[in-house]
Image: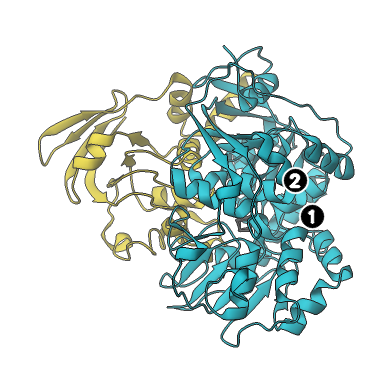
Chain colours: A yellow, B cyan
Amino acid sequence: MKAYGKAIKYGDNVDTDVIIPARYLNTSDPAELAAHCMEDLDKTFVKRVQKGDIMVAGRNFGSGSSREHAPIAIKASGISCIIAETFARIFYRNAINIGLPILECTEAAKEISDGDEVEIDFNRGTIYNVTTGKSYQSEPFPDFIQKIMNVDGLVGYIKNQIREG
Amino acid sequence: MGMTMTQKILAEHAGLKEVKAGQLIMAKLDMVLGNDVTTPVAINEFKRIGADKVFDRQKIAIVPDHFTPNKDIKSAEQVKKIREFSRQMGIVNFFEVGQMGVEHALLPEKGLVVPGDLVIGADSHTCTYGALGAFSTGVGSTDMAAAMVTGESWFKVPEAIRFILKGKPQRWVGGKDVILHIIGMIGVDGALYQSMEFTGEGLKHLSMDDRFSMANMAIEAGGKNGIFDVDEITLSYVKEHADKPYAIHRADADAEYTKTYEIDLGTIKPTVSFPHLPENTRTIDKVGIVKLDQVVIGSCTNGRIEDMRIAAGILKNRKVHPNIRCIIIPATQKIWKMAMNEGLFDIFVDAGAVVSTPTCGPCLGGHMGVLAKGERALSTTNRNFVGRMGDPESEVYLSGPAVAAASAVTGRISSPDEL
Ligand code: SF4
């Protein structure tokens, strides 16, 4: 699995309240949520994001509320992967469960600039900054989590389990 | 090697003799929780899995508390969806308006969580039940859906930070001040992926309501859970509220902690978090002049009966400042009724405050007190992120009920000693 896109960069402690404000939580429709993604942090996001783009951020990305609407909004807006120094744990779980690829890599998160073109090879956990020519290595997922990602999230995983009895 | 309290509960529910930090396990669940924001998404996923029944009708709790009583048509549709699902599945613990309270105040009160339990909830403040010596943590909607089908969930066994509490809190200092102090000290990711374990002789000065408000905010330090040693105070609460069997797990003497903090409760002052992060704390003597437009006393952090009593003690024979809207929200029907019977509503209403039916309401900028651009609120809730209570250009400050009530009187952030 690979991803290729331009980087959209944010800072530390991006919380789920700014990713998708509570005033839009009276719906669970992904397209509707995507239309307001990042609104309270960056009003230009929705206009400039293109399919395949890669979100890059600092520490504690996705902190706060457990709303799965946050990774759903990001995924539905076309983002193919999030790279951060660290993720808040519920967000980390939710992203895996809905099949939104995320990578922890401090160096890449610090050095990639807004607008850089980035290529990711998920199987090897490598991040390549096409603009600067620099590569980075992130921790690959543990086996169990990789299995969930391979079937596009937890629903696929549980379905397979039920099928296998 | 020894295990922490959290590790013992996880091991027991995974059917293992021992677990180690970092290990991935599958564990059985005693309770699965969802609310009106997260359950509709979980129902979509439940259907995608193709399931037609839940693992146990008794072990699921669904609480429409965020946008209820329904604030608009869309919210009404969401709640209708979870109500119909609950009926269809025969879910016993669905709490309709009239029974409903803020979920994390409601579940312990209804006796649905007891010491030693393993609970997940599609709400980040599910960590509240750690006050009872249970392992509880917030998850997302897909986790909730999978859990409703299988009765199990996957966990990475966490490391832990230990907080040894000693001494006795001063006047006007409650659990909220203690946890704000701790978050100010370690930061909003200071306990990322870890358990926060609270122990020590200082516990005897912290009531269950204090402990609930502390465990509630473990997530605000990035923690996976916050958990308290079980003592007589816990057990008398459990006896009064629950008839489920419980189990007491204590940390081994050689359990490993990434850090240990000793905290003298006697040195903590009333504490306020400034916008826009809970870690931006200042003690009450250092807040300066911060004028307010609104004061909110309620939520899963501080909407319990002791919070109501503290607020009433301060508002008695006083008036809310003319520039302030003071909104008081008892967290459950039971707390509401107690407050009414104790005469607290007379005090609130005579002071010029409003008393609302139980709801999350303003805590997440939902309804019942949303802020306009440029407005400032002091709130006993748990988050002061950008736009949390309304317009992205409004501000939220966090405190305990004593400072909140005093500030409602003066119109700016104040200590009760100033009155
Ligand atoms: S009171 Fe606030 S923090 Fe607590 S469950 Fe409701 S919205 Fe969440």
Q: Is residue A43 left or right of residue B158?
A: left
Q: Earlier in the sequence, mark 1 or mark 2?
A: 2
Residue name at image x 73 percent, y 72 percent: B356
Q: Amino acid at mark 1?
A: Phe
Expressed as whole percent of the image width and height from the top left, the position of residue A155 reads 56, 35
> Quadrant for ligand 1?
bottom right
Expressed as whole percent of the image width and height from the top left, the position of residue B399 reads 57, 62
Density class for disc 2 (Cα within 10 Å; few <14, some 14-19, many ≥20) is: many
Which element carries disc 2, helix, strand or loop? strand
Residue A4 can be seen, yes or no: no
Q: Is residue B340 left or right of residue A27?
A: right
Q: Chain of mark 1?
A: B
Q: Amino acid at mark 2?
A: Ala
Q: Which residue is mark 1?
A: B95
**What quarter of the picture does the C terminus of chain B occupy?**
bottom right
Residue name at image x 46 percent, y 50 percent: B184
Which element carries disc 1, helix, strand or loop? loop
Residue at the limit of the structure toward the left, as seen here: A132
Nearest the viewer among B121 and B130 is B130
Nearest the viewer among B262 and B330 is B262
Density class for disc 1 (Cα within 10 Å; few <14, some 14-19, many ≥20) is: many
Q: Is residue B173 left or right of residue B107?
A: left
Above or below residue B177? Residue B356 is below
Expressed as whole percent of the image width and height from the top left, the position of residue A135 reads 17, 30
Expressed as whole percent of the image width and height from the top left, the position of residue B132 reads 73, 38
Tag shown at residue B313: none
